[in-house]
Image (tube, rainbow, N blue to C red):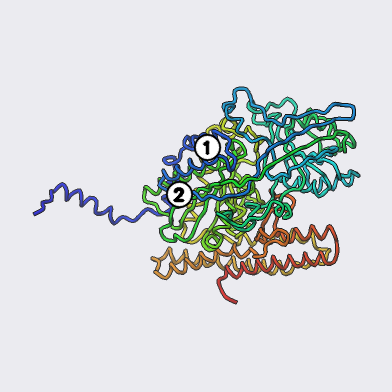
Amino acid sequence: MYKVSISSLIALAACIPLLFLPSPPKSYYHSLFLSDSISDNSSIANHLYILTRRPHVAGSQANSQTAAYVLSTLTSYNIQSHIRSYDVSLTYPVFRSLSLKPSSSEQPVEFDLCQEIYEGDPYADVANEVLPTFHAYAKSGTAIGPLVYANYGRVQDFERLREMGVNLTGNVVLARYGAIFRGDIVENAQEAGAIGVLIYTDRKEYGGGGGDTKWFPDDKWMPPSGVQVGTVYDGAGDPTTPGWPSTEECERISIEEVEKGGNVPLIPSLPISWADVDAIMRSIGGQVADEDWQGGKGAPVYKIGPGPGIVNLNYTGKHAISTIENIIGIIEGAEEPDRLVILGNHRDAWTFGTVDPNSGTAALLEVAERLGKLLKRGWKPRRTIVLCNWDAEEYGLIGSTEWVEENREILVSRVVAYLNIDIAVQDAGFQASATPQLDELLIQATQQLGRLGGGGSDYAAFIQHIGVPSADISFGEGYPVYHSMYDDFVWMKKYGDPMFHRHVAAASIWGLVALQLADEEILPFNYLSYAYELEKCAEELKDEVSDKGVKLFPLFNSIEKFKKAAIKINDEKKAFETVKARALPQRKDSWKVRELNDRLMMAERAFTDPDGLTTRPWYKHMIYAPSKHNDYGSKSFPGVDDSIEQAKSVNTKQSWLLVQHEVWRVARAITQASLVLSGKLT
C-alpha cells in the first residue's frame, strides 16, 4: 500500500486552492508589460549597438547578418519565427562623377563626392563598406548644362521660376532637401524640361543654420561632407513585379517597361553635400532668389541662373536581382487565433542606420522580449500577434509590400490592425499618425495626431493597398544626419537618446497598443472619430470646387450615413459592456462579439476600391494616399485631389466632370463602409 506522509498532505492541501484561482485579468499583464521589472534600456542599447556595427544596405551580406540576429533573438524569447525571402530588383552605383566649370575663363572643378571620416570615428575601419553616395533607381546617363536653382523642387517652386522667365529646358536643376520626397523633386524637374538634377542638404536646415554652428561629432548637425542618399522610386514594392509578389521564378517586367510606368525618373540625379554646393552656388548668376529661397548664415547669395556655371553630372547604376529577408515572429492567440495584430519595422539601412531604422528594430526586439516574459507568466493573447521585421524598405517599401501582395487574401480577411515604427527615436517629443478609428488608443500619448496618407514607411501596403487600420509612432520629427554616413551609434548615444529612455518609452507605447488590440474582447475602435475627420475633409474640399459646378452632396450624404452607423455601433458596444458587467456572459455572446468585431475590423476595407486611384492603381484607398507630388505627404480624398489638379491645369468642362466622377467614387466607398458598420443587408 502506498503511504502518504502528513507533510505531503499538508503541502497538497496548500496547492489545491491555487488550482482553482482564476487567471489574472488581461489588464494585469498589460500593467506588467509597462513595469520596470521587465523593461530594460540596456538591452535595447545592446541590440542597437549590435545591429549597427556595419553598414547594411538591402541585398548585402551585412544585412543578411542582421536578419540572422533578429531571427535568433526572437527565437530566444520562445517566439515562433521564420525568414521569408524574396528575390527583388535593386540598384547599386557603379560610377559617378561631378565637375563644375564656374565660367568660360575658369578651369573645371572636380568634386570627390565622398563623406569624410571624422577624427576618432570608431567605425573608420568599416567606412569603406558604405555605398558611394547615389539615388536608388536613378537613371544612368550624363547631363551637361547650365545650372538653375529651384529651391525645394516643389511644383510651386517651378511655377515661380516660370513667373521669373526662367526656362528649364536643357538645364541642370539644383534643389535642396527639406520639403518633399526626393523622387518628386527629380520628377518635377524632369517635367519642367531639365536634363539632370543635383539635390543637396542645405546648412540652413541640416547644419544648424550656418554661421559658427558646430557639426557632428561636436554637435548633432550634418558635417560639411554629409550627403543624404535614398531612393527616387515613388512606387511600392519590387518595380519589376507590380501588383504581385517576387517569389521564385515569378513573372517580371523589363526595366524598359518599368521606366514607361512612370514611377522612376528618366533623367540622371545625384545627392551632394552642402560643402560642394557652396562652390556650385557661387557659380550661378542671374536674378537673386526670393528671401525664403536663401540659405543660412554665412551662405553666398542664392541666385537663380541659368549659369554661367556649367556642371557635368555622370551617373551609372546597375540593376541586380537581390535576395531580401523578412523576419516573421508569431505569438498565437488563444481564443481568436485567426485574427491578427501586426507590428512592423524595417531593418535595412543606407549606412549604419542607428536612427533609421534600427532604433525601431531595437524597440521591436524589446517588445518581443517583454511579450516573451508575459508568456512565461501565463499570459496568452486573445488574438494572434505577428512581429514583422521588413527588408528593403529604403528602396521603396519592398519587403513589406511583397509580403502583403503574397498574403493579400489572408490579410484582408484576418488583420485587425497594423502598427508601424520606422524610426523609434530621433529626438524628443512623441509623434503618432493613424487612421481615425485608432485615435482613442493613441490620443493619451500625444497632443497631435496626423494621418497615414504619406507613403514614407511600411504601413503603406496595409492601409493604402488593402485597407487595414494602421498607426505609425515615433519620438522626434526629423534629424540632421538622416540617411548619411553619420547616422551611427555615436550620434544616438550623444544626441538622440543618451540614456535610451525614449527607446523604452517607444516600446512601451507600441506594445501596450498592440496588447489592447490583441486582448480587448470588443475591438477598441471608434469610427465616430473617422466620421468627424471625413466631415472636416469634405468642408475643406468645398473651397476648391465651389465655383466649378462640382456637386458635393453625394459626399456629404454618404458621410452622414457613415456617422449614423458609427453612432449605432458605438451604442451596441456600450450595451454589450453593460450586459457583461451585470451578469456572466452566455455562450451565444461569443458569436455576438465575433460579429460585432468583424464589422469593426472590415469597415476600413470598404474604403478601398479594386480599381485603385485613376492614375495610381496600386493605391486602392479612397480616403488616404500620398500626395501625387510629394510621396512623404498625405492627401485626403486623393482621387479627387488628383483630378482637381488636372482640371485646374486644362480647365475644360470634361476635366471638371471627371472631378465629379471622383467625388461619386469616394461617396460610394463611404456608403459601403456605412453598410459594413451596420451589418445589415439593404
Image quadrant containing the N terminus:
bottom left
- Where's residue 205, x and y in %? 72, 36
Q: Secondary structure at mark 1?
A: helix
Quadrant of the image containing the C terminus: bottom right
| Residue 418, placed above or below residue 34 | below
Check residue 51 in the rendering and tell me which mark sits there, or answer none. Answer: 1
Q: Is residue 238 left or right of residue 143?
A: left
Q: Is 277 situated above or below 4?
A: above
Location of residue 151 (image quadrant): top right
Seen from the viewer's position, the closer of residues 350 and 628 is 350
Is residue 339 left or right of 450 when viewed as pictured?
A: left
Point 39% across, 69% down: residue: 587
Say which element carries label 2. Answer: strand
Task: Tell me, yes or no, if residue 549 can be seen here.
Answer: yes
Query: Mark 2: which amino acid?
Result: Ser
* Image position, residue 94 (x, y; %): 68, 38
Label at residue 81: 2
535, 143: nearer the viewer = 143
Residue 536 visible here: no
State the image quarter where residue 202 is shown: top right
Mark 2, other Cα within 10 Å: few <14 / some 14–19 / many ≥20: many
